[in-house]
DNA sequence: GCTACTATTGAGTGACGCTATATACCAGTA
DNA sequence: TACTGGTATATAGCGTCACTCAATAGTAGC
């Protein structure tokens, strides 16, 4: 992955994953697959798992351990109330930034 | 500044500053002021100067030392050819990310 | 001498995403 | 039995970035 993308994902990837979880609960492996599906083809699994652990420690998600037919038990994460608030804050921050950049890019202010 | 904003600025602030320099050459103190002007009210001076040093080391900007009437000499930075290329790459990366997030936000995919 | 504005620099910190590796469970197959 | 491959999670170590805090330097006005 490009270096620029790596840096730009900092802080953003977290929001992306929370946004994915806001649709429905999912587990790590599934989330990684969904990210790839959506164009983030180079995001490593380790990155996602570490992020999920952080989200759990921050109290943004609830966890449920569910047995899998094809491997070790899955840890299914679901967004809780605090996570939803945090996600809204994320969108506010993102929108602010996106507006400024939009202006910078087209405006030639 | 919010933590989310701090993290989200990683990789982005660099592009913002380069975009500012793409309009016209400017020096650090001036750039900081312009950032505040544009809504980034809480970006510390130290942050900007460190970023400018990095950009210089990466060879993205040319530097000229010019005496000031009201203080120490100014270091005026101007975007060079490599910097322009890098800025274009930045916009490509940003657009990719912005599109995905747009989709995630509205799409409810 | 003191304050205030202009202008740059540097040490130390915390957070994040990446790399690489390890572990675990099951199915098919040689 | 041993091996391969897909599923599923975890973690140590790394580099980069923005932030905090402090220091330094030049000029002007009181």
Image (tube, coloured by chain):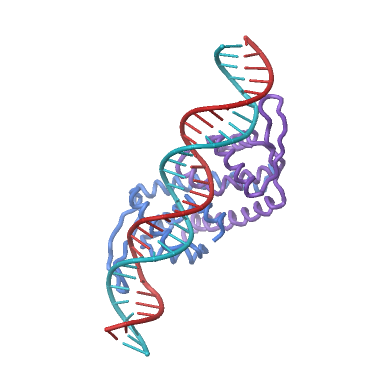
Chain colours: A blue, B purple, C cyan, D red
Using the image, determine if residue A69 lies above or below residue B57. Answer: below
Foreground of the two, D2 or B20: D2
Which residue does the image show at 68% across and 33% down from the upper left? B74
Horizontally, residue B70 falls left or right of residue A81, namely: right
Q: How many marks?
A: 0
**Whole-percent x, y for residue A92 in the image:** 49, 45
Foreground of the two, B37 or B17: B17
**Whole-percent x, y for residue C12 in the image:** 44, 38
Q: Quadrant of residue A18?
A: bottom left
Horizontally, residue B63 falls left or right of residue C1, namely: right
Using the image, determine if residue D15 lies above or below residue A109. Answer: below
Q: Quadrant of residue B43?
A: top right
Which residue does the image show at 50% across and 55% down from the upper left? B106
Which residue does the image show at 50% across and 59% down from the upper left? B107
Horizontally, residue D1 falls left or right of residue A86, namely: left
**Whole-percent x, y for residue A98 in the image:** 56, 48
Which residue does the image show at 49% across and 43% down from the upper left? B6
Foreground of the two, A74 or A82: A74
**Whole-percent x, y for residue A55 in the image:** 37, 52
């Amino acid at each position: 992955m490009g270096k620029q993308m790596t840096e730009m994902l900092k802080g953003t990837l977290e929001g992306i994953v929370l946004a994915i979880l806001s649709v429905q609960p999912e587990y790590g492996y599934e989330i990684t697959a969904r990210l790839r599906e959506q164009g983030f083809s180079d995001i490593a699994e380790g990155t996602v798992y570490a992020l999920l652990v952080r989200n759990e420690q921050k109290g943004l998600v609830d966890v449920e351990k569910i047995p899998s037919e094809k491997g070790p038990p899955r840890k299914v994460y679901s967004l809780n109330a605090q996570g939803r608030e945090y996600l809204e804050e994320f969108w506010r921050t993102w929108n602010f930034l996106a507006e400024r950049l939009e202006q910078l890019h087209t405006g030639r202010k």
